[in-house]
Every structure is written in C-alpha cells, then in structure tokens.
Amino acid sequence: AAMSEIDVTLTFINKLKDMGCRFALDDFGAGFSSFYYLKRFEVDYLKIDGSFIRDLAVDEGSRLFVKALNDVANGLSKQVVAEWIESPEVLKLLLGMDVQYGQGYLFRKPVPLEDTIQIPAVRAIRSSAS
C-alpha cells in the first residue's frame, strides 16, 4: 500500500521524522523495493533482505550485491542492517564491507515473550496492559 501511494507515504514519513521517528526500508532487494525508493524515501536505515545475506559466504553474486547496496546506501547517508546473520564467516564478510548493523541467529535466537518478563521495560508494559 505504501508503494502505491508514494506521495502520501512521503508525507507520512516526513511528519513522523519531524517528531523524531526514524525509518528503515525493510527487506531491500526483494519484492517491491528498488533503488528508486531508496533514493526517494527519507529513510534512515536500509535493511538488506536476508536471502542475500544467508548465502554470502558461498555465493559471489550475493557478495557483489550486498557490497553494492552497502556502498550506495552509505553514499546516500543511510545506515545498513544485514538480516539473517547465522555464521561467523558471514559476519566477517559483512565487517569487511563496513556494514553497520546486523541481526540474526548468530547473535541471538528469538525468545518466547514469556521469557522477557525479567526485562524492566517489558514488566512495565505488561503491568500497564493488565
């Protein structure tokens, strides 16, 4: 929906940015994402789709694509998040490309929300929801 109404989306993003919000263009490289949106939308982060990160250690094409995306994003003053980092080899390659952020099982597997009860911010949310 956001891509079909680009002017409305831009207005929405700009209003929220004026309030201090920051935005990420998620799953870049897949689906409806394109360099057009990267240039046009005033997002702060570019999240590279995990399908490119997953094969980074074994696929030269993925390495070329991720490096190019990282270089373009940095040239446009965007920070880059690599999704789906699952191995030390992939992390090493991303660090060599100067990718700023990473997500994935290498760092932490998803946890059941019940296990987050010890986190103070989560306790506050839970108590206000009841």
Image (spheres, rainbow, N blue to C red):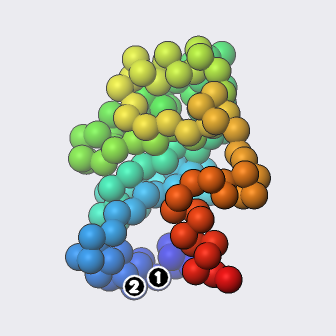
Disc number for residue 8: 2
Q: Amino acid at mark 2?
A: Val
Q: Amino acid at mark 1?
A: Glu
What residue lies at 63% left-to-right and 28% top-to-bottom? 106
Return the x and y of residue 49 as percentages of the image width and height: 58, 44
Disc number for residue 51: none
Q: Secondary structure at mark 2?
A: helix
Please indicate whether residue 97 sits to the left or right of residue 53 in the image: left
Specify few, some or many for label 2: CA neighbours under 10 Å numbering under 14, 14-19, or 20 or more.
Answer: few
Note whether 13 is above or below 36 in the view shown. below
Note whether 98 is above or below 96 in the view shown. below
Instruction: Tell me, yes or no, whether the two marked residues, 1 and 2, touch with CB atoms within 8 Å.
Output: yes
Badge count: 2
Return the x and y of residue 48 as percentages of the image width and height: 51, 43
Q: For mark 1, what is the residue?
A: 5
Please indicate whether residue 130 sits to the left or right of residue 37 in the image: right
**Front position in the image: 84 or 72:** 84
Quadrant in the picture for the N terminus:
bottom right
**Front position in the image: 128 or 5:** 128
What residue lies at 49% left-to-right and 18% top-to-bottom? 93
Return the x and y of residue 62 as percentages of the image width and height: 57, 27
